[in-house]
Amino acid sequence: MMTSHRSLLLLSLLASPLAAQPTSIRPLVPSPPKKEQQVFGPAPAVPASARGVRDRGELAAFLDGVMAANLRDKHVAGATVAVVKDGALFYANGYGYSDVAHRAPVNPERTLFRIGSTSKLFTWTAVMQLVEQGKLDLDADVNRYIDFKIPATYPQPITLRHIMTHTPGFEEDGRDLITDDTTKMIPLGRWLATHIPGRVRPPGTYSSYSNYATALAGYIVQRTSGVPFDDYVEQHILTPLGMTETTTRQPLPPRLRADMSQGYTWGDGSYKPQKFEIVNAAPAGSVASSAADMAKFMIAHLNDGAFNGQRILAE
């Protein structure tokens, strides 16, 4: 885990690569003068200060230029940015639209974006909470924790440590991974038991990205804690950090649906709305969150597991 003893400036950018999803622009810090924000020409490669950004107005001007150019050139409808510095939110803003048809602007506090594989960080946070409590062993055979069996293709068992480092040796298999049809949602345990990928390498010998393995880790959290994965993350990560605009649930809870940015593809000169995607390997990619909430999550990890007086991991 990273410590925050030095000055840190991190930027969290939420946008759907094929989807432009903005929010009502409500900066979490005082807005710089409007004149400074209207910077749409070519942006400098780096902010003016070579010593690091100390002024929000300087950062806003830099980001306005960068974001305007990228949204335009890449046909992204909307995006949102949060920057944390020295253990606190330094700047947040929304760009473009969360709903093009209704011209709804992106709001960094409220607009939700799907964060894709960044969702895996929530799964690993949950795993490490249970490791700290002595309920999980990073070096134990994962078969100890599940109700089906990963085949013993090799003498070495797969462990959570292998999964965390993407070295379990699984073949990557995208069958039934994502759907936009809610009737094709598969419960996590059943999906894992019926979609076991081939073990093509001994564990620990080769790094190869595995959505299945991370979903398996999430299922181990569910089995070990005795509560559904979504409930566990909500109770032990989101609620303590005050992440009220974040969820792992699919479809979205009713209270968050109005804040979800609309996904799009671009073709024939216009944005084409897309359906909300269901990730059957949910612990590997189901999270929807706002920029402000992701800033809280970042700060907690940079601050040895604590944010705003709440601790999600031991130091």
Image (spheres, rainbow, N blue to C red):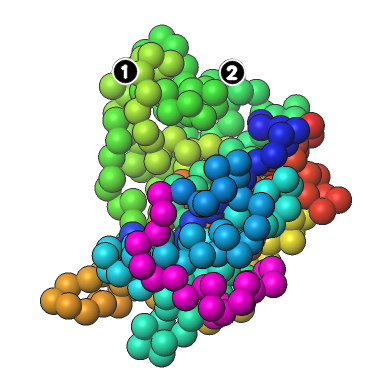
Secondary element under disc 2, as helix, strand or loop, is loop
Relative to 238, residue 117 above or below: above
Residue in the image at 27% along x and 47% along y:
175
Q: Secondary structure at mark 1?
A: loop
Q: Position of residue 66 (x, y in %)?
A: 41, 60
| Count of numbered labels shown in the rendering | 2
Magenta residues?
18-45
- Image quadrant holding the C terminus, namely top right
Question: Is 32 placed above or below 283 here?
Answer: below
Decide: few, some or many residues near mark 1? Use Cα within 10 Å; few <14, some 14-19, many ≥20.
Answer: some
Q: Which residue occupies the extreme left position in the image?
A: 268
**What amino acid does circle 1 point to?**
Arg
**Which of these two is toward me, 53 or 225?**
53
Report whether 154 appears left or right of 134: left
In percent of the image, x 40 and y 39: which residue is there?
212
Label pair 2/1, CB-CB below 8 angstroms: no
The residue that disc 2 covers is 139
Residue 154 appearing in the image: yes
> How many residues crowd around disc 2 within 10 Å: few (fewer than 14), some, or many (20 or more)?
few
**Residue at the image position 35 percent from the left and 28 percent from the top:** 208
Residue 247 sits above or below residue 218 on the image: below
Residue closest to the far top: 155
Q: Separation of disc 2 and disc 1 at Cα?
A: 18 Å
Q: Residue furthest right?
A: 309
Q: Is residue 24 magenta?
A: yes
| SS majority, magenta | loop
Residue 5 % position (x, y): 75, 33
Q: Amino acid at mark 2?
A: Asp
Residue at position x 63%, y 36% in the image: 127
Q: Which residue is mark 1?
A: 201
